[in-house]
Image (tube, rainbow, N blue to C red):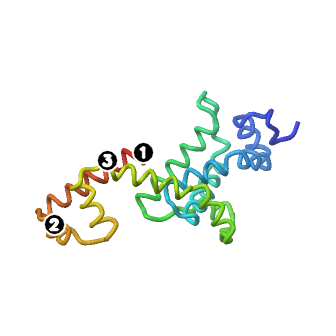
Amino acid sequence: MVAGGMDVRDEDLLVRSASEPEVFSAFYGRHAKDVLRYFAHRTFDPETAADLTAETFAQAFAARGRFRDRGRGAEAWLFTIARRQFARFVRRGRVEDRVRRRLGIPEIPLTPSDHERIEELIDFERVGRAVAEALSRLSVEQREALTLRVIDGRPYAEVARILGCTEQAARARVSRGLHRLGAALEI
């Protein structure tokens, strides 16, 4: 039986990799593209997506000895690590790479073809259509406020002046618009 063969369950690969570290590569091979896609859809940045993927798998490798199959599965365990990585990234504004560095995994720069492959995972056309559709569902006031503040990058005082409202009202329109946009896009 091949270590990464399809007849070996993910959960068994993780358990085995605690004593046979090379087996982890089969687990990585099965899930790397999905984890990379997960991050690419959230960051829209190939470098960040690749860095988050590397740190996710480094953390999974470091924690593989503690994995216990409790019915949720190895993939769910891996994506829990990925979601936590993304939350840290959002909070700190940068990718944590301490586990990758501690394990001695080198940072590998992306080639132009790597960038292209990751951007294909993002599918910018589909994202653009989804954003346009979600924007069309906003009220005119929210859409205008979002366009001025987020897309044009204007300060709230200027947004308020252009819209003929108070700065507080402009902030509320942007906030509500972002909330509705996020809910529509499921982000």
Residue that numbered label 2 is attached to: 160
Q: Residue 4 appears in which quarter of the rendering? A: top right
On the rendered structure, is 145 left or right of 106? left
Which of these two is toward me, 89 or 66?
89
Compute the Cα span from label 3 to label 1: 14 Å
Percent of width and height locating residue 72: 59, 31
Compute the Cα span from label 1 to label 2: 28 Å
| Residue situated furthest top in the rendering | 71
- Per the image, label 1 sits on a secondary structure element best described as loop
User: Of circles 3 and 1, which is in front?
Assistant: 3
Percent of width and height locating residue 102: 63, 62
Q: Is residue 10 above or below residue 134?
A: above
Which of these two is toward me, 14 or 34?
34
Residue that numbered label 3 is attached to: 137
Three-letter code, disc 1: Glu
Compute the Cα span from label 3 to label 2: 22 Å
